[in-house]
Image: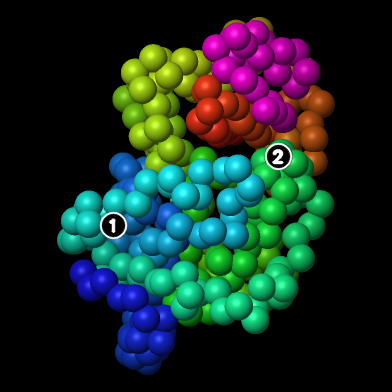
Amino acid sequence: MEKIVSKEILHKKIKEHKKKGKTISLVPTMGNLHDGHIFIVKKAREESDIVIVSIFVNPIQFGKGEDYKIYPRTIDKDLDKLKNICDYVFVPKEEDVYEKSSKDINVAEDNIAKTLCGKFRKTHFKGVLKIVLKLFNICIPDFAYFGLKDYQQYFLIKKMTKEFNLNIDIKPVSIYRDKDGLATSSRNSYLDKEQRKKALKISESLNLIKDKIKSSNEKSAEKLKKIVLSKLIPNLDVQYIEAVNKTNFEKTKTVDSNTLFLISCFCDNVRLIDNLEV
Ligand code: AMP
């Protein structure tokens, strides 16, 4: 594994690999790596010759008052975890990623980017799409891996890739959970013991949906959302719970095999997201 800071050096190395017919995978992350990230990297390792993991805490995907400044930066530990499972760790400097003159050039997001997480984090997906497009152009991967914990993000990136004919295969990776059911997240490190207990209600409530559909064939998305809400409140401050069709992100009234339930809530001041594919 080699740590690379310069985008030019990385780009050159990748081009050489490509000339030799090697397949390239990219796993974009913001670091503070947990088992969910490692699961993705190992998957990429199995499916391609060269694996690049990027670590960059992307300032423009954080809104005002969000946790950009305190976001955990654990680069030495991260590099240690990646030591034997990838080829390159790309750790660019902020000034190298964003030139001042490029501030106003963005990928225009569609309406879906303004719903769900985008409704509460107004500039989030604009920032995500910009950094991902930049990483794609630097790393010219054949495959790029995204976790389904951030389902809306995966959906938008897949859409952008198709829209701009980027010729990259976007690979979804299922949600990785700790033994107790909590989806792993860099932000889980903000939780103390009591908060973590409360946070478990999220996955428990999603399991309730599954049980209810199985046991009583409940198909009403509204009714299922209400059941979930009663489990989450008063432990957590719910930002949204929604049911959508995962192929187009339109709201769902009657549950079918394409239904995706998504939740965002605050556990005190820690924002957590999770979802369930029915
Ligand atoms: P982040 O470092 O939070 O930006 O995440 C980097 C990538 O890891 C994104 O594609 C996330 O969707 C993915 N990811 C983070 N947590 C999980 C998880 N628990 N299960 C699956 N993918 C995840």
Answer left or right for 113 relative to 179: right
Chain-order first, disc 2 or disc 1 = 1
Above or below 126: residue 93:
below
Q: Quadrant of residue 7?
A: bottom left
Secondary structure at numbered mark 1: helix
What numbered label is drawn on residue 120?
2
Give the amino acid at mark 1: Ile
What numbered label is drawn on residue 75?
1
Q: Quadrant of residue 259?
A: top right
Mark yes or no: residue 212 visible.
no
Q: Residue at x 52, y 22 (%)?
A: 268
Mark yes or no: residue 63 visible.
yes
Q: Residue at x 61, y 31 (%)?
A: 264
Answer left or right for 45 relative to 232: left
Q: Is residue 222 magenta?
A: yes
Q: Nearer the viewer, residue 18 or 57?
A: 57
Crowd class of label 1 (few under 14; some 14 to 19; many from 20; radius 10 Å): some
* Residues in magenta, as a range: 221-243
Label 2 within 8 A of ligand 1 by Cβ: no
Q: Position of residue 206 (x, y in %)?
A: 56, 21
